[in-house]
Amino acid sequence: MTTFELVKALCDIDGVSGAEDKVRDYIEAQVKDYCDCKVDARGNLICFKKGKKTPAKKIMLSAHMDEVGFVVTGIDDDGFLRFSTVGGIDSRVVIGKRVRLESGIPAIVGTKPIHMQSADEQNTPLKISDMYLDIGAKNKEDALESVSLGDTAAFFSNTVLFGNDRIKAKALDDRAGCACLIQLLQQEAEYDFTACFTVCEECGKSGADNAAYSVQPDIAIVVECTTAADVHGVGELDQVVNQGKGPAFVLMDTRCIYDRALFKKGMAIAKEHNVPCQVKRATSGATDAAVIQTMGAGVKVMGVSMPGRYIHSASSTLKLSDIDATTQLLGHLVNGLAD
């Protein structure tokens, strides 16, 4: 299976935070013949890969299975669905989009027509509370035949290749990271390592700490997507990371200071093996590293992030070369950090 085919298969599955079951089932089917798998009480998939050697330091790799999305919070008399976001979504990327309810029913995000809005409403970004999901129901009773309060919904977006080696999809954050770990598990390993596919990263990062407690690692490498602002109108110093320059090592974000010795060692390993890499030039965002590093007596954490444009939307993008470089880098990191 090519990288594109694997990432497409993962992104085409809906798995909003707290409803990752189908994603987990697919991943387990891909790796169960290559490692020992178990699912913990929270729904994390924990995969132990036996290598040729046992490392002096236990290494854990982590990528989250969940994606941002929506949850149904109400149904009005006309059959329109009220909803809230699950995870951080800019309301400006939501209006007019197609979404898919967990039952498979498609819906459109609607709002009051612009010519019915006041001048103030037209000049103010719409709030989620101003929107609704239209499933084509004729009334509330009709809607209730197929929808219940608490049902989740995800962006409904085709996964396609476009332009110069780029992939467009929903949920690249962090299905691309999951793809990297799957590919690594399917290869022969020089050293033992554990790969964890975690739940609920987009809503409080409450799954990775349970996985880390189970694994008890000395070192954890968190594989993520981060915002690439290398687009028109953004100055070089504000672009954070650039597509096509490989994965980015992270020094700090809003909830975590990553281990500086690991950061330097990781950069040296990438250089030694001629794997393209870069440094994230911002302290924004947060990852599962925030909860992993505080587990037990503490865990040394490293952040490896792929540069994605328009993440947390229906049309996030990555370069396939950056995904492949991340998988290569992770293999070298496991070997280089084992002693």
Image: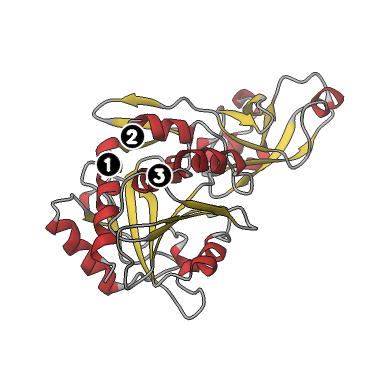
Outermost residue on the front side: it is: 52
The residue that disc 1 covers is: 324
Label 2 sits on a secondary structure element that is helix
Image mark for residue 258: none
Residue 121, percent across and down? 60, 37
Q: Which residue appears at 18% of the width and 61% of the height?
A: 269
The quadrant in which the C terminus is found is bottom left
The quadrant in which the N terminus is found is top left
**Vertical arrangement, residue 46 with respect to residue 56, above or below:** above
- Using the rendered view, name the quadrant where residue 273 is placed: bottom left
| Disc 2 and disc 1 in contact, CB within 8 angstroms | yes
How far apart in space, not on screen, are marks 3 and 2 (Cα)? 10 Å
Mark with earlier residue (3, 1):
3
Label 2 neighbour load within 10 Å: few <14, some 14-19, many 20+: some
The residue that disc 3 covers is: 182
Label 3 sits on a secondary structure element that is helix
Outermost residue on the right side: it is: 141
The type of residue carrying mark 3 is Ile
The type of residue carrying mark 2 is Thr
The type of residue carrying mark 1 is Asp
